[in-house]
Amino acid sequence: MIQAILKRLLGAVPAIIGVVIVTFVLTRALPGDPAAYFAGPAGSTEAIEEIRVKLGLDRSLPEQFVSYVGDLVRGDWGNSLTTGQPVLAEIADRLPASLELTLVGLLLAVVVAIPLGVLAATRPGSWIDHLCRGITTAGVSLPTFFTGLLLAYVFYFLLGWAPSPLGRLDPYATAPDFVTGFYLIDSLIAGDLETFASAAKQLILPAITLALFVLAPLARMTRASMLGVLSADFIRTARASGLRPTTVLFTYAFRNALLPVLTTLGMVFSFLLGSNVLVEKVFAWPGIGSFAIEALVASDYAPVQGFVLAMALLYVLLNLLIDVAYGLVDPRARLEA
Amino acid sequence: MNALSNPLLEVDRLAVEFRTRGGTVRALENVSLALAEGETVGLVGESGSGKSVLSFAAMGIQDAAARITAGAIRFAGQDLLAKKGAAMKALRGREMAMIFQNPRVALNPIRQVGRQIEDVLARHTDLLPAARRARAIECLAEVRIPDPERRYAAYPFELSGGMCQRVMIAIALACKPRLLIADEPTTGLDVTTQAAIMRLVRELSAERRMATLLITHDLGMAREYCDRIAVMHAGHIVEVGPTEALFAAPRHPYTERLIAATPVGAASLAELAAIDGNLPDLRRADLPACRFAERCPRRGAECERPLALAPAGASSATHLIACHRPLTAAATEARHAAFA
């Protein structure tokens, strides 16, 4: 098993190399000149030129690439021009915020979508089936920035139930000591329930926004997959053996229906990391998405490259995780060493 | 009715309908069939004749769209149709069990086969987990699976089709049922495996004095393994009789055509007599009393009259037919003598 995982990780290396090359070329091909941007509107031609030399942008592209790769190998992802901080540190600082939001959103979606899909499949044509269809249609047709704004408007502005949509904690709370970077977990480790409550309150609206977005594909896939499995021959065998309906439904049908749902889960997780950018903007979430957008606007190469690379690594890990989970459910898909 | 005095399974004038968008399908009508303990009865007929509908109704696992509109099903004297869901489920898998065609897809693909046997044992017995496991391995051994301890942990995709069917049989027989319904158990298996599976079913049925209903469209197989045969056509049972009598002298024109359409020995496909026409559309409101009438070369005016299974002759109380213009025993016997 371990051997198989290592093998899979090694297999991802070419993809990562590809990502490094493509992001390097793409950032260089983008319009905009970082030297001009940082010299400011009043910067003279000499000042711009000076900055260009300082940044190494006067050298040829291959030269720049070689030094970039050399830095990467040494673990140096470059510095952000806007903040002056090392990119790796910035990403390490912001990634947990994005991951916490994404995972909580995903968890919410799973907790709602899977029972909904199962119920809709076991009672086709019932009110719950119609509810499922309604929610999935709404879920796919509402863009996240819109639901995010709507939720903030209703629950913060109109009702005042939610705190102001400004980041991960209210202004009076202090961040818990760093262990995992997830405030919900770190505050519990520190035994600080007040901070936990504050973090949870800040998290709830953006997490619901994301959950609404991924609910649709998950519920729909669960329903379709359950319907398919429930009409399978082996379900008839299970019924003919007199097995209890709960055994038939969970041990026999649901575990089999889970396989396409897992695949969908991996896919929507990737969507979420992408659509995070918008939600993070709406809720002023100090995550990796808003960081990358700001860097992109400023033609700040290093953070953009760092962001894409971090995402690529995350995708590789995610896919591996999904494959391992798949193997746990389905013996036919066990990873071969 | 049948001459069985004390049947184990008794289907009495059963009618089953399917409500579909295209109309009501009258899938079974006035179907009566009885099985005695230890007896093997073959249920034969074309695809779509209602063989599976009958067996699913007997097991209580019919499709949600199916309605039983008339008749009764009795098992060991108990009225199955009056049983509530839970009581029926307790019977199913313990007293009466079923095996299906295409065994590779009829088993849960992601559960170890031994565990699937254990699921049935857990449902119907009080065995503790360790004993359950031991009994599951024993069940695998009973269906002559070599190395049952190792096979316990196998998944269906790791086994051949024949092995999967043996596992199916092990699941069905785990609780020693009194009735086994085998729904085309050899469909999807290669020919050599078919014989092995049928021999296994026959041996196990004999060992346990288990009543067996063998559903098949293979007349040759029915002839070899069954004590009696019931012929179905378009939701009616048209002829029931002891195997030898029925093959020696089929009385219903449909049975006679069916036998003529069955390959024997090296007969080439071209020599086989196809049956003209198709099964009638069972959604029709104007279905004739005899649903074979429209395909029947012997059709006459009296075929419009209501029809029921009745003894084929004064001398044969066990040979029943539903036909107003049956073939005479002498005529068919002569023809079949020519074949043999």
Image (cartoon, rainbow, N blue to C red):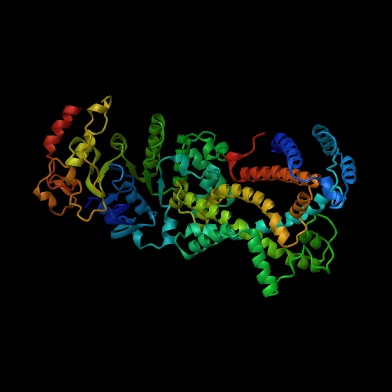
Which quadrant of the figure contains the C terminus of chain A? Answer: top right
Image position of A148 (left or right of A129): right
Q: Residue furthest left?
A: B301
Residue A327 picture location, percent across and down: 62, 42
Taking the spot 68% from the left edge, 51% from the top edge, the residue there is: A274
Q: Residue furthest bottom?
A: A159
Image position of B29 (left or right of A115): left
Which quadrant of the figure contains the N terminus of chain A? Answer: top right
Residue A27 picture location, percent across and down: 75, 42
Residue B326 picture location, percent across and down: 13, 43
Residue A279 picture location, percent across and down: 69, 59
Image position of B263 (left or right of B336): right
Query: How many numbered marks appear?
Result: 0
- Depth order, front residue of A323/A283: A283
The answer, for residue B245, to whether it is visible in the render is no
- Depth order, front residue of B133/B287: B287
- Depth order, front residue of A8/B245: A8
Image position of A184 (left or right of B291): right
The answer, for residue B290, to whether it is visible in the render is yes
In the picture shown, does residue A324 fall above or below B189? below
